[in-house]
Amino acid sequence: MSILITNIKELVQVRAKSIPKIKGKAMNELPKIDNAFLRIEKDRIVDYGRMESLANHNANIKIDATNKVVLPTWCDSHTHIVYASNRVQEFVDRINGLSYEAIAQRGGGILNSAEKLQLISEDELYKQSIKRVKEVIKMGTGALEIKSGYGLSTESELKMLRVIKRIKDHFPIKIKATFLGAHALPGQFKNDKSGYLDLIINEMLPIIAKENLAEYVDIFLEKGYFSIEDTNQLLTAAKPYGLIPKIHVNQFNAFGGIEVATSHKALSVDHLEVVNLEDIQALKSSDTMPVALPLCSFFLSIPYTPARALIDEGLALALASDYNPGSTPSGNMNLVISTACIKMKMTPNEAINAATINGAYAMGISDEYGSITKGMKANVMITKEIPNYNYLPYAFGDNHIDKVIINGEII
Ligand code: NIG
Ligand code: FE
Protein backbone atom coordinates (compact mmCIF):
# COMPACT_ATOMS: atom_id res chain seq x y z
CA MET A 1 0.00 0.00 0.00
CA SER A 2 1.35 3.45 -0.92
CA ILE A 3 0.00 6.93 -0.32
CA LEU A 4 1.06 10.05 -2.18
CA ILE A 5 0.07 13.42 -0.72
CA THR A 6 0.53 16.28 -3.17
CA ASN A 7 0.28 20.09 -3.28
CA ILE A 8 0.87 20.35 0.47
CA LYS A 9 0.84 24.00 1.41
CA GLU A 10 3.32 23.45 4.22
CA LEU A 11 5.00 20.16 5.12
CA VAL A 12 6.04 20.86 8.68
CA GLN A 13 8.70 19.33 10.95
CA VAL A 14 10.83 17.94 8.14
CA ARG A 15 14.14 16.58 9.40
CA ALA A 16 16.73 14.89 7.21
CA LYS A 17 17.69 12.67 10.17
CA SER A 18 15.73 11.84 13.30
CA ILE A 19 16.91 13.91 16.24
CA PRO A 20 16.37 12.70 19.78
CA LYS A 21 15.32 16.06 21.22
CA ILE A 22 15.46 19.81 20.68
CA LYS A 23 16.44 22.32 23.32
CA GLY A 24 16.91 26.03 23.96
CA LYS A 25 17.01 28.38 20.96
CA ALA A 26 16.76 25.50 18.50
CA MET A 27 13.23 24.90 19.76
CA ASN A 28 12.21 27.98 17.82
CA GLU A 29 13.26 26.42 14.52
CA LEU A 30 10.64 24.38 12.76
CA PRO A 31 11.84 23.23 9.33
CA LYS A 32 9.17 23.08 6.62
CA ILE A 33 8.80 22.71 2.86
CA ASP A 34 6.25 24.82 0.99
CA ASN A 35 4.28 23.33 -1.91
CA ALA A 36 5.43 19.84 -1.06
CA PHE A 37 4.67 16.19 -1.61
CA LEU A 38 4.95 13.28 0.81
CA ARG A 39 5.18 9.64 -0.14
CA ILE A 40 4.32 6.78 2.21
CA GLU A 41 4.95 3.12 1.53
CA LYS A 42 3.54 0.48 3.86
CA ASP A 43 4.00 1.97 7.34
CA ARG A 44 6.94 4.25 6.53
CA ILE A 45 7.66 7.71 5.17
CA VAL A 46 9.80 7.05 2.10
CA ASP A 47 10.10 10.37 0.29
CA TYR A 48 9.23 14.05 0.37
CA GLY A 49 10.24 17.24 -1.37
CA ARG A 50 9.00 20.16 -3.37
CA MET A 51 6.25 19.49 -5.93
CA GLU A 52 8.58 20.44 -8.82
CA SER A 53 10.83 17.52 -7.94
CA LEU A 54 8.05 14.91 -7.89
CA ALA A 55 8.78 12.55 -10.77
CA ASN A 56 6.79 9.42 -9.95
CA HIS A 57 3.08 10.09 -9.53
CA ASN A 58 2.08 6.47 -8.99
CA ALA A 59 0.44 5.44 -5.72
CA ASN A 60 -2.46 3.31 -4.45
CA ILE A 61 -4.01 6.32 -2.76
CA LYS A 62 -3.53 9.93 -3.88
CA ILE A 63 -4.47 12.81 -1.61
CA ASP A 64 -4.54 16.41 -2.82
CA ALA A 65 -3.59 18.69 0.07
CA THR A 66 -4.04 22.05 -1.65
CA ASN A 67 -4.22 24.79 1.02
CA LYS A 68 -3.64 22.18 3.71
CA VAL A 69 -0.78 21.66 6.14
CA VAL A 70 0.80 18.28 6.91
CA LEU A 71 2.55 17.57 10.19
CA PRO A 72 3.72 14.53 12.13
CA THR A 73 1.06 13.34 14.59
CA TRP A 74 1.25 14.47 18.22
CA CYS A 75 3.23 12.41 20.70
CA ASP A 76 1.27 12.72 23.95
CA SER A 77 3.79 11.53 26.53
CA HIS A 78 1.65 11.85 29.67
CA THR A 79 -1.91 10.59 30.06
CA HIS A 80 -4.18 8.76 32.47
CA ILE A 81 -6.63 7.97 29.68
CA VAL A 82 -7.64 4.62 31.21
CA TYR A 83 -10.12 5.48 33.95
CA ALA A 84 -13.61 4.66 35.13
CA SER A 85 -16.37 7.25 35.07
CA ASN A 86 -15.91 11.01 35.42
CA ARG A 87 -15.43 13.45 38.31
CA VAL A 88 -17.80 16.13 37.10
CA GLN A 89 -19.22 16.69 40.60
CA GLU A 90 -15.74 17.66 41.87
CA PHE A 91 -15.54 20.17 39.03
CA VAL A 92 -18.74 21.80 40.28
CA ASP A 93 -17.52 21.59 43.90
CA ARG A 94 -14.33 23.42 42.95
CA ILE A 95 -16.27 26.18 41.26
CA ASN A 96 -18.24 26.49 44.46
CA GLY A 97 -15.08 27.07 46.45
CA LEU A 98 -13.52 23.75 47.43
CA SER A 99 -9.86 23.36 46.48
CA TYR A 100 -8.38 20.36 44.61
CA GLU A 101 -6.40 19.58 47.79
CA ALA A 102 -9.49 19.84 50.03
CA ILE A 103 -11.43 17.49 47.74
CA ALA A 104 -8.58 14.98 47.92
CA GLN A 105 -8.42 15.29 51.71
CA ARG A 106 -12.09 14.40 52.12
CA GLY A 107 -11.52 11.17 50.16
CA GLY A 108 -12.35 12.51 46.71
CA GLY A 109 -9.84 13.05 43.92
CA ILE A 110 -7.64 10.10 43.05
CA LEU A 111 -9.34 7.94 45.71
CA ASN A 112 -12.71 8.69 44.15
CA SER A 113 -11.40 7.43 40.80
CA ALA A 114 -9.85 4.38 42.50
CA GLU A 115 -13.17 3.47 44.11
CA LYS A 116 -14.96 3.67 40.77
CA LEU A 117 -12.27 1.69 39.01
CA GLN A 118 -12.39 -1.10 41.59
CA LEU A 119 -16.09 -1.57 40.89
CA ILE A 120 -15.98 -2.05 37.14
CA SER A 121 -14.89 -5.03 35.10
CA GLU A 122 -11.81 -5.10 32.91
CA ASP A 123 -14.04 -5.28 29.83
CA GLU A 124 -16.06 -2.24 30.86
CA LEU A 125 -12.88 -0.31 31.66
CA TYR A 126 -11.53 -1.19 28.22
CA LYS A 127 -14.77 -0.09 26.58
CA GLN A 128 -14.83 3.27 28.35
CA SER A 129 -11.15 3.91 27.68
CA ILE A 130 -11.05 3.10 23.97
CA LYS A 131 -13.78 5.64 23.34
CA ARG A 132 -11.35 8.29 24.52
CA VAL A 133 -8.42 6.73 22.67
CA LYS A 134 -10.41 6.89 19.41
CA GLU A 135 -11.28 10.53 20.07
CA VAL A 136 -7.67 11.61 20.62
CA ILE A 137 -6.51 9.75 17.50
CA LYS A 138 -9.06 11.69 15.49
CA MET A 139 -7.56 14.88 16.90
CA GLY A 140 -4.10 13.87 15.69
CA THR A 141 -2.50 11.91 18.49
CA GLY A 142 -0.32 9.16 17.04
CA ALA A 143 1.58 8.07 20.15
CA LEU A 144 0.25 7.86 23.66
CA GLU A 145 1.76 7.14 27.06
CA ILE A 146 -0.81 5.74 29.49
CA LYS A 147 -0.41 5.44 33.25
CA SER A 148 -2.00 3.15 35.79
CA GLY A 149 -2.55 4.70 39.21
CA TYR A 150 -6.31 4.62 39.74
CA GLY A 151 -6.14 1.02 40.96
CA LEU A 152 -4.15 1.38 44.17
CA SER A 153 -4.49 -2.36 44.90
CA THR A 154 -2.66 -5.19 43.20
CA GLU A 155 -5.80 -6.44 41.52
CA SER A 156 -6.93 -3.06 40.22
CA GLU A 157 -3.50 -1.82 39.17
CA LEU A 158 -3.15 -5.01 37.14
CA LYS A 159 -6.63 -4.46 35.72
CA MET A 160 -5.55 -1.05 34.47
CA LEU A 161 -2.25 -2.29 33.06
CA ARG A 162 -3.95 -5.18 31.28
CA VAL A 163 -6.39 -2.74 29.72
CA ILE A 164 -3.44 -0.63 28.55
CA LYS A 165 -1.91 -3.78 27.07
CA ARG A 166 -5.15 -4.54 25.23
CA ILE A 167 -5.17 -1.02 23.81
CA LYS A 168 -1.55 -1.53 22.74
CA ASP A 169 -2.47 -4.77 21.00
CA HIS A 170 -5.59 -3.45 19.26
CA PHE A 171 -4.71 0.07 18.17
CA PRO A 172 -2.18 1.07 15.53
CA ILE A 173 -0.84 4.08 17.43
CA LYS A 174 2.27 3.69 19.58
CA ILE A 175 1.39 3.07 23.22
CA LYS A 176 3.74 3.09 26.20
CA ALA A 177 2.63 1.92 29.65
CA THR A 178 3.66 3.46 32.96
CA PHE A 179 3.09 1.88 36.36
CA LEU A 180 1.87 4.56 38.78
CA GLY A 181 0.89 2.47 41.79
CA ALA A 182 2.34 5.26 43.96
CA HIS A 183 -0.26 7.81 42.88
CA ALA A 184 -1.98 8.17 46.28
CA LEU A 185 -2.32 6.22 49.51
CA PRO A 186 -5.38 3.95 49.38
CA GLY A 187 -7.80 4.16 52.33
CA GLN A 188 -6.72 0.92 53.98
CA PHE A 189 -3.11 2.16 54.12
CA LYS A 190 -4.06 5.64 55.32
CA ASN A 191 -1.71 5.43 58.29
CA ASP A 192 0.73 2.94 56.82
CA LYS A 193 2.59 4.41 53.91
CA SER A 194 5.50 2.04 54.26
CA GLY A 195 3.04 -0.86 54.18
CA TYR A 196 1.68 0.37 50.85
CA LEU A 197 5.16 0.89 49.43
CA ASP A 198 6.00 -2.66 50.51
CA LEU A 199 2.95 -3.91 48.63
CA ILE A 200 3.98 -1.98 45.51
CA ILE A 201 7.57 -3.16 45.69
CA ASN A 202 7.14 -6.76 46.81
CA GLU A 203 3.83 -7.72 45.25
CA MET A 204 2.96 -5.45 42.32
CA LEU A 205 6.37 -4.82 40.73
CA PRO A 206 7.34 -8.51 40.34
CA ILE A 207 4.03 -9.38 38.63
CA ILE A 208 4.15 -6.33 36.37
CA ALA A 209 7.69 -7.17 35.34
CA LYS A 210 6.91 -10.85 34.82
CA GLU A 211 3.89 -10.09 32.63
CA ASN A 212 5.74 -7.27 30.88
CA LEU A 213 2.94 -4.81 31.65
CA ALA A 214 4.92 -1.57 31.88
CA GLU A 215 7.97 0.16 30.45
CA TYR A 216 8.04 3.05 32.90
CA VAL A 217 7.47 3.70 36.59
CA ASP A 218 5.97 6.86 38.06
CA ILE A 219 5.30 8.29 41.54
CA PHE A 220 3.39 11.38 42.64
CA LEU A 221 6.25 13.15 44.42
CA GLU A 222 4.38 15.89 46.25
CA LYS A 223 3.57 17.08 49.76
CA GLY A 224 0.73 14.98 51.13
CA TYR A 225 1.46 12.16 48.65
CA PHE A 226 4.94 10.62 48.37
CA SER A 227 8.26 11.96 49.67
CA ILE A 228 11.81 12.04 48.38
CA GLU A 229 12.61 9.00 50.54
CA ASP A 230 9.62 7.11 49.14
CA THR A 231 10.75 8.01 45.62
CA ASN A 232 14.30 6.81 46.25
CA GLN A 233 12.96 3.56 47.67
CA LEU A 234 10.57 2.90 44.78
CA LEU A 235 12.94 3.85 41.98
CA THR A 236 15.75 1.79 43.48
CA ALA A 237 13.43 -1.21 43.68
CA ALA A 238 12.07 -0.71 40.15
CA LYS A 239 15.47 -0.42 38.50
CA PRO A 240 16.41 -4.13 38.44
CA TYR A 241 13.16 -4.75 36.54
CA GLY A 242 14.26 -2.29 33.87
CA LEU A 243 11.47 0.17 34.64
CA ILE A 244 12.60 3.68 33.71
CA PRO A 245 11.27 6.58 35.83
CA LYS A 246 8.88 9.26 34.57
CA ILE A 247 7.91 11.33 37.57
CA HIS A 248 4.99 13.56 38.63
CA VAL A 249 6.86 16.31 40.45
CA ASN A 250 6.77 20.04 41.35
CA GLN A 251 3.04 20.38 40.73
CA PHE A 252 2.40 22.37 43.89
CA ASN A 253 5.73 22.49 45.73
CA ALA A 254 9.44 22.53 44.87
CA PHE A 255 11.60 20.69 47.41
CA GLY A 256 14.35 18.89 45.53
CA GLY A 257 12.22 16.32 43.72
CA ILE A 258 13.62 17.08 40.28
CA GLU A 259 17.17 16.45 41.49
CA VAL A 260 16.09 13.10 42.91
CA ALA A 261 14.38 12.17 39.64
CA THR A 262 17.39 13.15 37.53
CA SER A 263 19.73 11.25 39.85
CA HIS A 264 17.69 8.13 38.99
CA LYS A 265 18.05 9.00 35.29
CA ALA A 266 14.35 9.71 34.86
CA LEU A 267 13.33 9.92 31.21
CA SER A 268 11.01 12.79 32.08
CA VAL A 269 9.83 14.97 34.94
CA ASP A 270 6.27 16.10 34.48
CA HIS A 271 4.12 19.03 35.72
CA LEU A 272 6.75 21.53 36.97
CA GLU A 273 4.21 24.26 37.62
CA VAL A 274 6.60 25.38 40.37
CA VAL A 275 10.30 25.47 39.48
CA ASN A 276 13.29 26.95 41.32
CA LEU A 277 16.93 27.58 40.38
CA GLU A 278 18.13 24.28 41.85
CA ASP A 279 15.58 22.45 39.69
CA ILE A 280 16.87 24.18 36.57
CA GLN A 281 20.42 23.30 37.53
CA ALA A 282 19.50 19.65 38.04
CA LEU A 283 17.79 19.55 34.64
CA LYS A 284 20.78 21.15 32.94
CA SER A 285 23.11 18.40 34.06
CA SER A 286 20.79 15.57 33.01
CA ASP A 287 19.19 13.95 29.97
CA THR A 288 15.76 14.18 31.61
CA MET A 289 13.00 15.85 29.59
CA PRO A 290 10.87 18.40 31.46
CA VAL A 291 7.21 17.99 30.46
CA ALA A 292 4.62 20.74 30.84
CA LEU A 293 0.89 19.99 31.09
CA PRO A 294 -0.82 23.31 30.33
CA LEU A 295 -4.37 21.95 30.28
CA CYS A 296 -3.96 20.82 33.90
CA SER A 297 -2.96 24.38 34.84
CA PHE A 298 -5.90 25.72 32.84
CA PHE A 299 -8.44 23.37 34.41
CA LEU A 300 -7.22 23.70 38.00
CA SER A 301 -6.35 27.41 37.72
CA ILE A 302 -2.85 26.77 39.01
CA PRO A 303 0.37 28.36 37.68
CA TYR A 304 1.68 27.35 34.27
CA THR A 305 5.08 25.71 33.90
CA PRO A 306 7.55 28.57 33.33
CA ALA A 307 8.36 27.54 29.79
CA ARG A 308 10.20 30.75 28.93
CA ALA A 309 12.57 30.40 31.87
CA LEU A 310 13.32 26.77 31.00
CA ILE A 311 13.81 27.27 27.26
CA ASP A 312 15.72 30.54 27.68
CA GLU A 313 18.07 28.66 30.02
CA GLY A 314 18.82 26.37 27.09
CA LEU A 315 16.67 23.45 28.24
CA ALA A 316 14.33 21.25 26.24
CA LEU A 317 10.61 21.12 26.97
CA ALA A 318 7.87 18.70 25.97
CA LEU A 319 4.13 19.30 26.04
CA ALA A 320 1.57 16.64 26.93
CA SER A 321 -2.12 16.52 27.79
CA ASP A 322 -2.27 14.78 31.21
CA TYR A 323 -5.73 13.54 30.12
CA ASN A 324 -7.42 12.33 33.34
CA PRO A 325 -10.79 12.69 35.06
CA GLY A 326 -9.60 14.92 37.92
CA SER A 327 -7.22 17.59 36.74
CA THR A 328 -7.49 17.47 32.91
CA PRO A 329 -10.58 15.96 31.32
CA SER A 330 -9.27 16.56 27.81
CA GLY A 331 -6.74 14.89 25.55
CA ASN A 332 -6.91 17.55 22.88
CA MET A 333 -3.27 18.16 21.90
CA ASN A 334 -4.31 21.00 19.59
CA LEU A 335 -5.66 22.81 22.62
CA VAL A 336 -2.46 21.90 24.50
CA ILE A 337 -0.31 23.76 21.98
CA SER A 338 -2.73 26.71 21.85
CA THR A 339 -2.67 27.02 25.62
CA ALA A 340 1.12 26.76 25.65
CA CYS A 341 1.35 29.62 23.15
CA ILE A 342 -1.30 31.80 24.77
CA LYS A 343 -0.54 31.25 28.45
CA MET A 344 3.09 30.13 28.53
CA LYS A 345 4.39 32.44 25.79
CA MET A 346 5.80 29.60 23.77
CA THR A 347 6.06 30.35 20.06
CA PRO A 348 4.07 28.05 17.75
CA ASN A 349 7.44 26.64 16.56
CA GLU A 350 8.44 25.80 20.13
CA ALA A 351 5.05 24.35 20.98
CA ILE A 352 4.97 22.11 17.90
CA ASN A 353 8.51 20.88 18.56
CA ALA A 354 7.51 20.25 22.18
CA ALA A 355 4.46 18.20 21.19
CA THR A 356 6.19 16.14 18.50
CA ILE A 357 9.95 15.48 18.73
CA ASN A 358 10.28 16.27 22.45
CA GLY A 359 7.09 14.38 23.24
CA ALA A 360 8.55 11.40 21.41
CA TYR A 361 11.73 11.69 23.49
CA ALA A 362 9.65 11.73 26.70
CA MET A 363 8.20 8.38 25.71
CA GLY A 364 11.42 6.89 24.38
CA ILE A 365 10.39 6.70 20.72
CA SER A 366 12.10 9.62 18.97
CA ASP A 367 13.99 7.27 16.65
CA GLU A 368 10.72 6.44 14.87
CA TYR A 369 8.15 9.10 15.74
CA GLY A 370 7.84 12.88 15.94
CA SER A 371 9.15 14.14 12.60
CA ILE A 372 8.79 13.88 8.83
CA THR A 373 11.91 11.85 8.14
CA LYS A 374 12.58 9.15 5.56
CA GLY A 375 12.36 5.73 7.16
CA MET A 376 10.29 6.86 10.11
CA LYS A 377 6.78 5.68 10.93
CA ALA A 378 4.15 7.13 8.63
CA ASN A 379 2.14 8.86 11.36
CA VAL A 380 1.03 12.17 9.91
CA MET A 381 -1.97 14.47 10.01
CA ILE A 382 -3.48 16.59 7.30
CA THR A 383 -5.26 19.76 8.36
CA LYS A 384 -8.37 21.28 6.84
CA GLU A 385 -7.73 24.30 4.63
CA ILE A 386 -5.85 26.80 6.82
CA PRO A 387 -3.62 29.78 5.96
CA ASN A 388 -0.49 28.31 7.62
CA TYR A 389 0.59 26.19 10.56
CA ASN A 390 0.58 29.11 13.03
CA TYR A 391 -3.19 29.06 12.56
CA LEU A 392 -3.36 25.79 14.54
CA PRO A 393 -2.60 27.33 17.95
CA TYR A 394 -4.12 30.68 16.94
CA ALA A 395 -7.66 29.58 16.12
CA PHE A 396 -7.99 27.69 19.39
CA GLY A 397 -10.83 25.38 20.27
CA ASP A 398 -11.67 24.36 16.71
CA ASN A 399 -10.72 21.04 15.19
CA HIS A 400 -8.44 21.83 12.26
CA ILE A 401 -7.46 18.22 11.62
CA ASP A 402 -9.01 16.68 8.53
CA LYS A 403 -7.24 13.31 8.14
CA VAL A 404 -4.97 11.25 10.33
CA ILE A 405 -2.66 8.59 8.90
CA ILE A 406 -1.28 6.03 11.31
CA ASN A 407 1.28 3.41 10.23
CA GLY A 408 0.52 4.32 6.64
CA GLU A 409 -3.24 3.81 6.95
CA ILE A 410 -5.87 6.50 6.81
CA ILE A 411 -7.93 6.42 10.02
O1 NIG B 1 -1.26 14.45 36.74
N1 NIG B 1 -1.08 15.05 39.97
C1 NIG B 1 -1.33 13.88 39.99
N2 NIG B 1 -2.08 13.14 39.19
C2 NIG B 1 -2.90 13.54 38.11
C3 NIG B 1 -4.30 13.86 38.45
C4 NIG B 1 -4.89 13.02 39.47
C5 NIG B 1 -6.37 13.17 39.62
O2 NIG B 1 -6.85 14.19 40.12
O3 NIG B 1 -7.04 12.21 39.24
C6 NIG B 1 -2.27 14.68 37.36
O4 NIG B 1 -2.77 15.82 37.37
FE1 FE C 1 -0.58 13.18 35.41
Image (cartoon, rainbow, N blue to C red):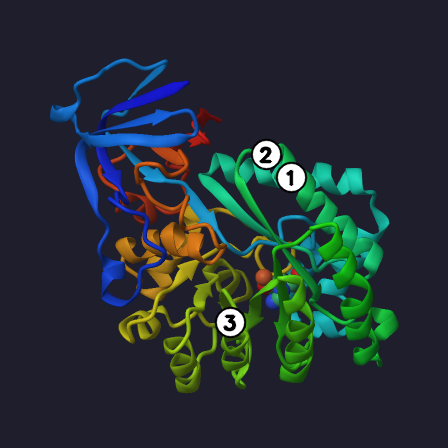
Residue shown at 54% from the left, 75% from the top: 261
Write down the quadrant of residue 7 in the picture: top left
Mark 2, other Cα within 10 Å: few <14 / some 14–19 / many ≥20:
some
Quadrant location, ligand no. 2: bottom right
Mark 2 — residue? 171
Mark 1, other Cα within 10 Å: few <14 / some 14–19 / many ≥20:
many
Disc 2 residue type?
Phe
N-terminal of the two: label 2 or label 3? 2
Q: Secondary structure at mark 1?
A: helix
Mark 1 — residue? 167
Query: Quick one: 316 or 243, which is closer to the camera?
Result: 243
Cβ–Cβ under 8 Å for marks 1 and 3: no
Mark 3 — residue? 265
Q: Secondary structure at mark 2?
A: loop
Write down the quadrant of residue 313 in the picture: bottom left
Disc 3 residue type?
Lys
Which percent across, then down, holds residue 215? 61, 55
Q: Alpha carbon of mark 1 to alpha carbon of mark 2: how far? A: 6 Å
